[in-house]
Image (cartoon, rainbow, N blue to C red):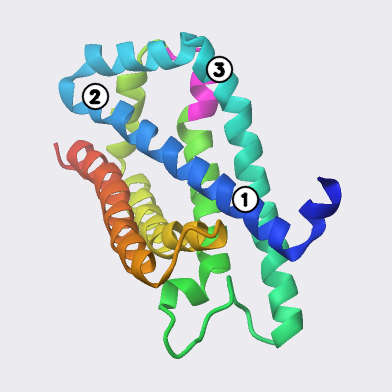
Amino acid sequence: MKGFAKTSIGKKLFMSISGLFLITFLLVHLSVNMTLFLGKEAYNQAVEFMDTNPMIQIMQPLLALGFLLHISYSFVISIQNRKARGVERYAVVDNNNSSWASRNMLALGIFVFAFITVHLIDFFLPMKTTHVADAYELVVSRFDLWYVAACYLIGFIALGFHLHHAFWSAFQTLGLSNELWRKRLARMGDIVAILLPTGFACINLYFFIF
């Protein structure tokens, strides 16, 4: 297993699996955050459920591990591809037919990583270390600041571009994408790349404007 993880195929496989795992987490995270529109009580109850649910507590370290694996393998693969071809690429693609996102996945990934770091500092760490009594008010107080709202909007846009290529590329790496399914997965990727960032952005804009 260790030997396979060091191969090019193994690295891409682990990066794809971890990426799909992170997308699943984002869907769950968005569904929980949508309770913000239901008011303070609903959101605080949702946060309390996430904080006390044993399964969620088990998943948190797995999520952190998946994120670290994903970003680590993306760096390694990008560096190896650049050395091999003299061109910085995320995967084996034809630059004439590839999208801008596919040619800049590493840069987008770094930007998303910085964005997630800011998000952890803003919300996750305060909730875990200082035991915030009112999670709803914490969200409202942060998104009420124009520079915080702007930072998050830019982060959501970068996330959308990253997901646009990552979704179908992950299935292709897993061997689940042929000529027919690549088009279907590309459409599904478009939906995911629009749905997730737009959902998060709507929350951001709502509390900034209102």
In space, the residues marked 3 and 1 are separated at their CA atoms by 20 Å
- Residue 46 among magenta residues: no
As drawn, the label of residue 90 is none
Inspect the image, locate mark 3, and give the three-letter code of the amino acid beneath it.
Answer: Gln
Residue 38 is left or right of residue 100, and the answer is left
Q: Residue furthest bottom?
A: 96
Instruction: Please report contact status of discs 2 and 1: CB closer than 8 Å, yes or no.
Output: no
N-term mark: 2 or 1: 2
Residue at (62, 53) in percent of width and height: 15
Q: Nearer the viewer, residue 41 or 60?
A: 60
Q: Which residue is mark 1?
A: 70
Q: Nearer the viewer, residue 142 or 180?
A: 180
Q: Nearer the viewer, residue 100 or 134?
A: 100
Q: Which residue is mark 3?
A: 57
Residue 190 is left or right of residue 210, and the answer is right
Q: Residues within 10 Å of mark 2 (few under 14, many from 20)?
A: some
N-term mark: 3 or 2: 2
In space, the residues marked 3 and 2 are separated at their CA atoms by 20 Å
Q: Quadrant of residue 165?
A: bottom left
Relative to 34, does residue 163 appear above or below in the rendering? below
Q: Residues within 10 Å of mark 1 (few under 14, many from 20)?
A: many
Q: Which residue is mark 2?
A: 35
Inspect the image, locate mark 1, and give the three-letter code of the amino acid beneath it.
Answer: His
Inspect the image, locate mark 2, and give the three-letter code of the amino acid beneath it.
Answer: Thr
Q: Which quadrant does the C terminus fall into? A: top left
Which span of residues is magenta-colored?
124-132
Residue at (55, 52) in percent of width and height: 114
Give coordinates of residue 80: x percent, y percent: 74, 73
Badge 1 element: helix
Give coordinates of residue 12: x percent, y percent: 65, 59
